[in-house]
Amino acid sequence: MSLDKEKNILIVGAGLCGSLLAIRLGQLGFNVCLTEKRSDIRTTTVDGGRSINLALSDRGLKALRMVGLEHKIREICIPMYGRMLHFENGETKLSPYSGRQDEYINSVSRNDLNRILIEEADIHPNVEILFDHDCIDVNIDESKAQFTFNGKERIIDTDIIIGTDGAGSIVRKELFDKRNDEKLSIEFLDHGYKELEIPPGESGGYQIEKNALHIWPRGDYMIIALPNMDGSFTVTMFNAYQGANSFEEIDQTGFRKYIEDGFSDLMPFIEDLEKSYHENPVGKLGTVKCYPWQDEGKTLIMGDAAHAIVPFYGQGMNASFEDVTIFNEVLDQGHENWESLFQAFQTRRHPSAVAIADLAVDNFYEMRDHVADEDFIKKRQLEMKLEQEYPAYYSKYSLVTFKEDLPYEEAKAKGRAQDEYLLKLVKEKALSEIDLNKLVETLTQ
Ligand SMILES: Cc1cc2nc3c(=O)[nH]c(=O)nc-3n(C[C@H](O)[C@H](O)[C@H](O)COP(=O)(O)OP(=O)(O)OC[C@H]3O[C@@H](n4cnc5c(N)ncnc54)[C@H](O)[C@@H]3O)c2cc1C
């Protein structure tokens, strides 16, 4: 017996994960209906016209390669070779992501990426896409989903529902309402984020280094900036909601003063930053952990709906794309029915989702508190040396970001152990005293 390919699959949410999944299932000949609450991204402005960008790395690129889109997406990517650290005294320092020349991450526009995925999904006659369909209820037992469309209610009766409707997923909510004995946790950080903009220079060029991810680490708060294709940068500030240097305090004492006091090298862009500070909302940051992700082979959740994470490893989208890679691999195993397929998928994937969620929280503290710390900088220098001279050695960051075939849980275990060892070593010894041969032997044992 083999999997029944005639079943109708309803995907709720045509964001990054849902549209990639629709492409893959479309390529494999399944009947797919992809629904999205927003209007068609190809013909409307989303996010209030703001450019929002994401760091795309090897795991995400691997998934795009699987559907034949890697080259097309690389054309809209800007390579970022390292973190450009901006210190309080205005000095900067580039900290490369890897000691190997060919390893870097990419800044890509969320809208352009999503638009290309939708265009590609739409090519397949067996993939129907319904925009302006806001899913308001899901009947898990009967595989029916209720939508509002043009002010009216519409019910779609299907065989299988896959929820890729993001961190606030309605499919997840209904799944866990049904299975109230199961585990669901949603934890918010006491920090939120706000997106600002540095526009292109007068001649259209970049006003700060183009090929880097900029970070202004300041202990309990920080700012980052990623380049866009048009010469602008999307700047994101991360602050607590309340207390010292919080959004509440900035609102009281003034944004201009906040930048002047802690980020003097951003003052040349203050007019634009200030304008966007007042126009844009504060977003929440949270981690969703839940299990199981499926019910009776009729409902499944994927992407942020199953495992939203804080954005500090730049891996949320990459992990959501990797879900599709793994789902494809599990499909290839030749399961006899959908329940066995969904179970195999969640068993294989859930440990990875938990691992990247934990790593992302680690990196929040690393980026915020430690990137400017002397021991941390020394450790990064040592890791760069190791990666340059011993290409088989991968730092924790490289294991997560550039080892596309290594499950996140293995990257986490190995990376954390290495980190602990190296940090202890750089505290005890000068870099010149460290025997690299011996060290690599110890680390790769
Ligand atoms: C500030 C920030 C920065 C980030 N930076 C990075 C980064 O650099 N690199 C990285 O890899 N990840 C990053 N991420 C994470 C990344 O954005 C998510 O992991 C990724 O978008 C998840 O994709 P998804 O398709 O699962 O969910 P989403 O992209 O959220 O898509 C969900 C889709 O479902 C639709 N939808 C929602 N509800 C309904 C409904 N009821 N009915 C119909 N449709 C619905 C939504 O409109 C949306 O289109 C960042 C996240 C944040 C918040």
Image (spheres, grey):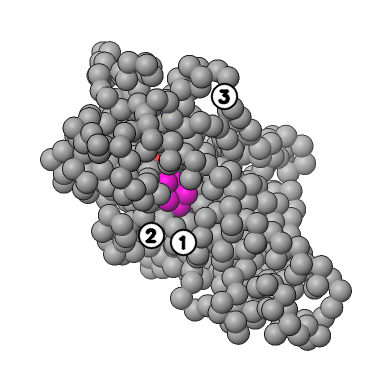
Between marks 3 and 1, how big is the CA–CA gap?
A: 31 Å
The image position of residue 169, as x and y in percent, is: 45, 28
- For the record, the magenta segment spans 317-323
- The extreme top residue here reads 153
- As drawn, is 162 to the left or to the right of 176? left
Q: Name the residue under label 1.
A: 404
- As drawn, is 237 to the left or to the right of 162? right
Q: Quadrant of residue 13?
A: top left
- Tell me the SS state at disc 1: loop
Circles 3 and 1, Cβ within 8 Å, touching? The answer is: no
Q: What residue type is labelled 2?
A: Lys
* Mark nearer the N terminus (3 vs 2): 2
Q: Which amino acid does label 3 sit on?
A: Glu
* Mark nearer the N terminus (1 vs 2): 2
Circles 1 and 2, Cβ within 8 Å, touching? The answer is: yes
In the image, residue 230 above or below residue 114:
below
Q: Name the residue under label 2.
A: 62
Quadrant for ligand 1?
Answer: top left
Residue appearing at x 52%, y 39% in the figure: 307
Between marks 1 and 2, how big is the CA–CA gap?
A: 7 Å
Q: Name the residue under label 3.
A: 182
* Mark nearer the N terminus (3 vs 1): 3
